[in-house]
Image (spheres, rainbow, N blue to C red):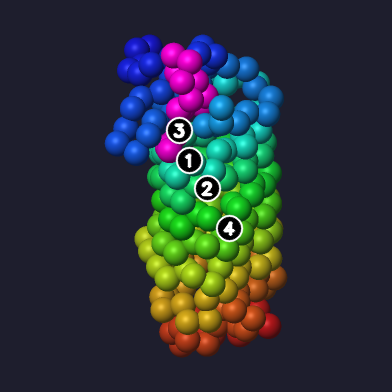
Amino acid sequence: LYIQGEITDDKYHVVRKTGAGYELVCYTGPGGTLTPGTDLLLNGNPITITSIGKFAYRHVQQSFKAIIDDNVLKIGEYCFANARLTYADLGGTKVLDTYSFVGASSLTHFNTDNVVEEIGRYSFTKCTKLFYVEFPEVITIDSNNLFTGCDSIVSIIFGTKVETISGGAAVGQNNTRLRELWVKNPNYPGGFGFVTHQSVFINNGQLKIYCCDTFIEGVSYHYRQLFHQLV
């Protein structure tokens, strides 16, 4: 497999210069507790990693945790796809690209450090052990199949700044353990089409949907009828 870039002094990372710093293209070392973007040297000089690229961690054969450096602003598409990742601290990451954690079936939870602003579609599809997610600072979400196949998840919280939840369903018939969905922006301008009808009925009325601290009233009559069945 040919990967374009330069090998760092530790011989485990391949990096590529970008306008804002360096992209971490590939990691080929062992598992354990990894610190993407931290203390990397190239030809004896420290470098700043500002993004992690596509499929960067596909070669890690052992289970691992990722403590991502605060300078990393973007996690690229498929970055941790199907990886044996158990925990992630997202550091300073602002953007999670499409499919960024898809199929990371050992991931149970992560720390967003109050920073993530944008989440791409399919980001957490088939993260089957993920049980709790909170994005306090998120603004934009492409909800297409965001949590499809996350059959262990019980709580999803979007913070006070969320303005746009676009695309298809974020939660649905595969989220059978989901008990609460919070949108904490009391002035959230969007609709709630990202919640499918199946998610309401398959959970046997146990899913509660909140905007700020109350049930949603500012949506269509049809959805209000569904919400009233949950009370």
Quadrant location of the N terminus in the rendered image: top left
Give the mark, 2 or 1, whose residue is nearer the N terminus: 1
Q: What residue is shown with label 4?
A: 114
Q: Quadrant of residue 104?
A: top right
**Residue hosting label 2:** 92
Name the mark on residue 72.
Answer: 1
Measuring 57% from the left and 16% from the top, which residue is drawn there? 29
Q: CA distance from mark 2 to mark 1?
A: 6 Å
Is 68 placed above or below 208 here?
Answer: above
Q: Secondary structure at mark 4?
A: loop
| Pointer 4 or 2: first along the chain | 2
Of the two numbered discs 1 and 3 on the same chain, state the one appearing first in sequence.
3
Mark 3 nearby-residue class (10 Å; few <14, some 14–19, many ≥20): some
Q: Alpha-carbon neighbours of circle 2 within 10 Å: few (<14), some, or many (≥20)?
A: some
Marking on residue 187: none
Q: Are marks 4 and 2 in contact (CB under 8 Å)?
A: no
Let me know if residue 191 appears in the view.
Answer: yes
Judging from the image, what secondary structure is the residue with disc 1 in? loop
**Residue 177 x %, y %:** 68, 58
Residue at mark 1 to residue at mark 4: CA–CA distance = 14 Å
Give the residue displayed 41% in from the left and 62% down from the top.
140
Which amino acid, mark 1?
Val
Segment tinted magenta in the rendering: 40-57
**x and y percentages locating residue 226 in the rendered image:** 55, 80
Q: Mark 2 is on which residue type? A: Gly
What's the distance in space between the residues labelled 1 and 3, CA to CA? 8 Å
Q: Callout 4, which amino acid?
A: Asn
- How many residues crowd mark 4 within 10 Å: few (<14), some (14–19), many (20+)? some
Residue 58's x, y, as percent? 50, 24
* Amino acid beneath label 3: Thr
The residue where tag 3 is placed is 48
Is 33 placed above or below 201 here? above
